[in-house]
Image (cartoon, rainbow, N blue to C red):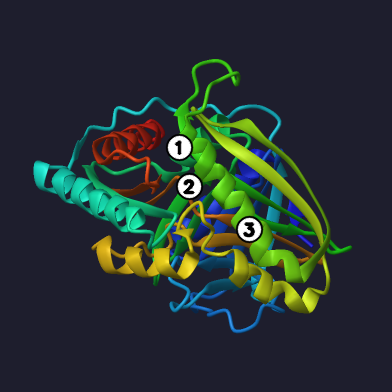
Amino acid sequence: MDSVLNNTAFFKKIEDVYHSNMPFVVYRKPNETKIYGVCQQTSELHILKSFKACGFVFSPFDKNKSKIIFPFNVCNRISSIIENDFQVSKSDLKFKVEIDETIKNNYISTVQNAIDFINNDEAKKIVLSRKETITCQKVEVFNVLKKMLNSYKNAFVYLWFHPKVGLWMGATPERLISIDAQLNLKTMALAGTQKFAGTLQVKWKEKELFEQQYVTDYILENISDKITEVHKKGPYTAIAGSLIHIRTDIFAKLKSLNLLQKLIDSLHPTPAICGIPKKVATDFILKNENYERAFYSGYLGELNSGNTTNLYVNLRCMRLAKNNATLYIGGGITDKSNAEKEWEETVAKAQVMKQVL
């Protein structure tokens, strides 16, 4: 059981753990007011060996790489209720962005290669990403966390640290899976992006509507043998901070808890961060992106916590190290994509993330 603290005591505890260079994670689930802290008692790096384990899991994009877990039985767990928005200091952070024409041209070229690949009927969709490294003065990580908590109430917001891995934080709008004690399953298909302009009554382009339907169909097809009682809600326009997406909610019943690992493997990487077909898209990404995604577009969250599992896709995230903040951004490529516009979309997404620094 976790200890319930007031906000001041909660953040004092977490900051003490951070300054002692010990592993911890702080997180708040979408549309909830409870914030959790999981603080590991040693600096050991625990690798997930079984999906029957209980803890907070942090998985990279590449499923051949190790998944990290903070096992609950070696952690102190605390929580607090967020009653009001946090008071945050205004950032006077000055930073320069290490982007030149070579980076831009390389990304556009890679996107065009993906479009040509798709037009040759090799794939339906490929999600390509890039990273953007900002050189800056010292980032006040807890101030950034509080800004995220204030700005992204309907996202999974987290700050994760391990001295042997580094510090990651983000605010992701995409649920991978939620499973309760009765094996009720929730997942979602998320695709398409626009800036929020004050209304959810927007017109989506044909490319975005097709992309979202691809994602929905693929998810249902890949998990059909593991579930029963399927129904869905959507597609509809959903807001995530200053951006909006097309979303379909999928509800079902998992046939057996023993199928949890197979279910996760079927869903991840999702079409929203990989493509369709999954193996073809993944191979293209690993061969052509020319950088390692690491934990970007992996997944994270509670595994078997009180007979429930809540995992989220690691989008809208950044890695902080010394005087650098590395942002990870991407977009879905289909036969209707325009390479130059795809570049501009990543620039817009990066700008949204810079606002919390």
Q: As drawn, which residue projects farthest toward the bottom?
A: 49
Kind of element beneath mark 2: strand
Q: Is residue 350 left or right of residue 219?
A: left
Identify the disc placed on residue 219: 3
Q: Is residue 98 left or right of residue 186?
A: left
Q: Could you give the CA–CA distance between mark 1 and mark 2, rounded to whole angstroms?
A: 27 Å
- Neighbours of disc 3 within 10 Å: few (<14), some (14-19), many (20+): many
Residue 62 vertical position relative to residue 311 in the rendered view, above or below: below
Task: From the top left corner, tell me how far across and down residue 121 is, in percent.
Answer: 38, 59
Return the residue nearer the eye: 186 or 308: 186
On the image, the x and y values in percent for residue 179 come to: 77, 60
Cα distance between the residues tagged 1 and 3: 19 Å
Q: Residue furthest front?
A: 120
Front of the two marks 1 and 3? 1
First in sequence: mark 1 vs mark 3: 1
Quadrant in which the C terminus appears:
top left
Q: Earlier in the sequence, mark 1 or mark 2?
A: 2
- Disc 3 is placed on an element classified as helix
SS at mark 1 in the image = helix
Residue drawn where x is 66% and y is 42% of the image:
248
Q: Is residue 81 visible?
A: yes
How far from the left and from the top, in percent, is residue 241?
53, 31
Compared to 188, does 201 lie above or below? Answer: above
Which residue corresponds to the image point at 66% horizontal and 62% vertical from the top-left? Answer: 221
In the foreground, 18 or 319: 319
Could you tell which of marks 2 and 3 lies nearer the N-terminus? 2
- Residue type pointed to by label 2: Gly
x and y percent of residue 314 in the render?
50, 54
| Mark 2 lies on residue | 170
The numbered dot on residue 207 is 1
- Asked if the residue under mark 3 is in contact with the one under mark 1, i.e. CB atoms within 8 Å, the reply is no
Residues at marks 2 and 3, CA–CA distance in whole angstroms: 24 Å
